[in-house]
Amino acid sequence: MNTLVVTRLEWRRLLVRPLAWVLAALTLAWLGWNFTLLLGSFLAGQIQRAALPDGPGFTDLVAVPLLGQLAQLAFLVVPLLTMSVIAGERRNGTLPLLFAAGVPASRIVLGKYLAILGWLLLWLLLTLAMPLTLAHATHLDWGKLAAATLGIALMLAALAALGVACSSFASHPAIAAAAALILALVLWSVNLGAQMTGINGGAINWLAMSTHVQPLLRGLVSSADVLWFVLLIALSLALATRRLATDKERG
């Protein structure tokens, strides 16, 4: 059994789980409503902004804020989506079946992670489709929108890896969800104290996820920011793999 088989099995499990459908329906409905509000506010202030030569446009006032709201929802959605990927297998006693099938721990972790990531990227694309439906009627800053989309995609990928790691260490899905939520919030706001004292640089700011997401939402793409997400994903998946390998050795 290879990684793609594990991914396909986990994807099918997502499709039959009511939780995944409920999360998709509720969040997309909420984002659709907020898109309508953002669009209404944009149209209401269009005359005043016409007098500003370099004023904010549709991308700054509608598309990017909508992606920012998706990022806020992700702190709740991703832990709920990832909480059962491994902790659920352990609780139901089905994890030894994967080990007995000869599936390496790395393939189990990677396969489940790719399935979750596929769901999250589809969620992002459906959200992105809302402002793109008006691309023919307004002026989109494609560069800024692409940078913001990249930032949210990297954030979703990092949160998914963190959720899978928490699920691999937890004995119950609820514990995994709580741990993933707490760690994600800590990572996002670990530099708040430093910022309140006027410190905008240093290691504590580099550790914060917000430090690397916010420039991307402003249209600034940096290899250092991308590398931060890659390191977090790799570390989380490595820890999850190590934990599963230990479980396999113990039998």
Image (tube, rainbow, N blue to C red):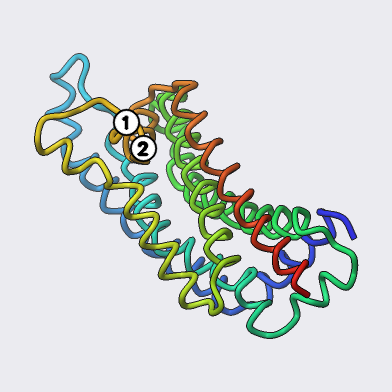
Q: Residue at x 77, y 68 (%)?
A: 248
Q: Residue furthest front?
A: 250
Q: Secondary structure at mark 2?
A: helix
Query: Is 38 rendered above or below residue 170?
Result: above
Q: Residue at x 54, y 79 (%)?
A: 172
Residue type, numbered disc 2: Leu
* Crowd tier of the residue under label 2, counting other residues whose Cα lies within 10 Å: few below 14, some 14–19, many 20 or above: some
Residue 198 placement, left or right of 209: left
Q: Nearer the viewer, residue 7 or 146?
A: 7
> Can I make out residue 94 in this image?
yes
Q: Which residue is mark 1?
A: 203
Residue 131, horizontal then vertical, whole percent: 43, 42
Residue 94 placement, left or right of 37: right
Q: Quadrant of residue 201?
A: top left
Q: Residue furthest left?
A: 197
Residue 150, horizontal then vertical, whole percent: 50, 34
Q: Residue furthest bottom?
A: 92
Q: Which residue is mark 2?
A: 207
Q: Quadrant of residue 119?
A: bottom right
Circles 1 and 2: CB atoms closer than 8 Å: yes
Residue 114 placement, left or right of 167: right
Q: Residue at x 72, y 66 (%)?
A: 10
Q: Quadrant of residue 12?
A: bottom right
